[in-house]
Amino acid sequence: MSKHTKIIIITVMIIAVIIPSLITGCSLRKMTDIGSDIYRSINKDNSDDKKKSDKNDASKDKGNEGSSGVETITYRDVEGNEFVMDVDPDVKKHDYDLSKLKHREGSDKISFDDGKYTIRKGVDVSHHNGVVDWEKVKKAGYTFAFLRLGYRGYGKDGQLMVDREFQSSFKRARAAGMKLGVYFFSQAINEKEAVEEAKLVLRELNNSKLDLPVVFDPENIKNDEARTDNVDGDQFTKNTLAFSKVIKEAGYKPAIYCNMHWEDQMLDLGQLSDLPIWYADYCAKPQTPYRFTFWQYSESGKVDGISGNADLNVWFVKTGKNK
């Protein structure tokens, strides 16, 4: 055997030994009120290259450090595709002790108290949920809600629409003592359209008091042609900033709705550091290392007062002296 052949064999053996292995995460979905699954499968054919064989929990929770010294974590999207994400050291991380989180994937039951934070339970609804009995929702232990104020159609025309249940639901939820925020399903392709969406929100709110943010909810539409198909992450980030500026100048608190796919491959979180994050991830616990305030943990919950499936959320709030 030649010296050159030996070197090649040794090199192959070393590479086989040092390839890191980890699997993390679970089903990751994003809510839709248009009736379509709004996830885009990114590089599905290439995702197998990123799959790992070692399933130990330590790797799941702590992530790995790549050869470049950058921390990485592996997460799964809704289709089971796995992606390795470089963790941005400049983006603020959450400081929740998730070992204190008691929640089983797919379960409505959830509790959390790590001495610094606790949670409040909430829902988010649109006209697809029908007429909600907010008194029953409140008695069931849910104290806050995000209401869909409106949406832009994802067809070519991109028509702006107000959710037909919004005004009625807002009044009845307020009367029941729910803390309220709103969200807008965006299909803006540029900053001008994002500003149009923000102005519609302000018109419908008509100076009404909110307890929670006005949330910008950008979407990709799968399995159908959509006006945002060619909008990249840079433009989505610009749209978010444009929408948020108008909302903030009107005296409301803007926020952004996203999941791991959007945090990893779409939005520039560094430019959105001032915005609270409403994070969607239907796992036993959140996969993201980054900060978030609200967590949508289920799309199939059962809540007295809401017909059919309900989107379930928790709000992480500081406790006692930590406020």
Image (tube, rainbow, N blue to C red):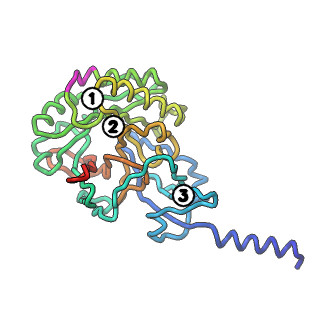
- Can residue 267 be seen? no
> Whole-Å distance between the Cαs marked 2 and 3?
35 Å
Q: Kindly indicate whether the residue at mark 3 contacts the one at mark 2 (C-beta within 8 angstroms).
A: no
Q: Kindly indicate whether the residue at mark 2 contacts the one at mark 1 (C-beta within 8 angstroms).
A: yes
Residue 163 — which label?
1
Q: Position of residue 218 (x, y in %)?
A: 42, 35
Which residue, given by chain and number where applicable, does mark 3 sit on?
71
Q: Report the residue at 75% width, 70% height from top.
A: 11
Q: Could you classify mark 1 by the number of other residues whose Cα lies within 10 Å: few (under 14), some (14-19), or many (20 or more)?
A: some
Q: Position of residue 65 (x, y in %)?
A: 56, 61
Q: Under tag 1, what secondary structure? A: loop
Q: Under tag 3, what secondary structure? A: strand
Q: Could you classify mark 3 by the number of other residues whose Cα lies within 10 Å: few (under 14), some (14-19), or many (20 or more)?
A: some
Q: Report the residue at 33% width, 27% height from top.
A: 248
Which residue, given by chain and number where applicable, does mark 2 sit on?
33
Q: Earlier in the sequence, mark 1 or mark 2?
A: 2
Does the magenta run of residues contain 76? no
Which residue in the rendered view is the most extreme toward the front?
321
Which part of the image, by quadrant, shows the N terminus?
A: bottom right
The stretch of residues the image draws in magenta is: 203-208
Residue type for callout 3: Glu
Q: Earlier in the sequence, mark 3 or mark 1?
A: 3
Q: Horizontally, is 318 left or right of 90 in the view?
A: left
Q: Horizontally, is 112 left or right of 20 in the view?
A: left
Q: Position of residue 132 (x, y in %)?
A: 16, 39
Q: Horizontally, is 163 left or right of 227 in the view?
A: left
Residue 54 — which label?
none
Q: Report the residue at 31% width, 58% height from top.
A: 106
Residue type for callout 2: Asp
Q: Earlier in the sequence, mark 2 or mark 3?
A: 2
> Whole-Å distance between the Cαs marked 3 and 1?
42 Å
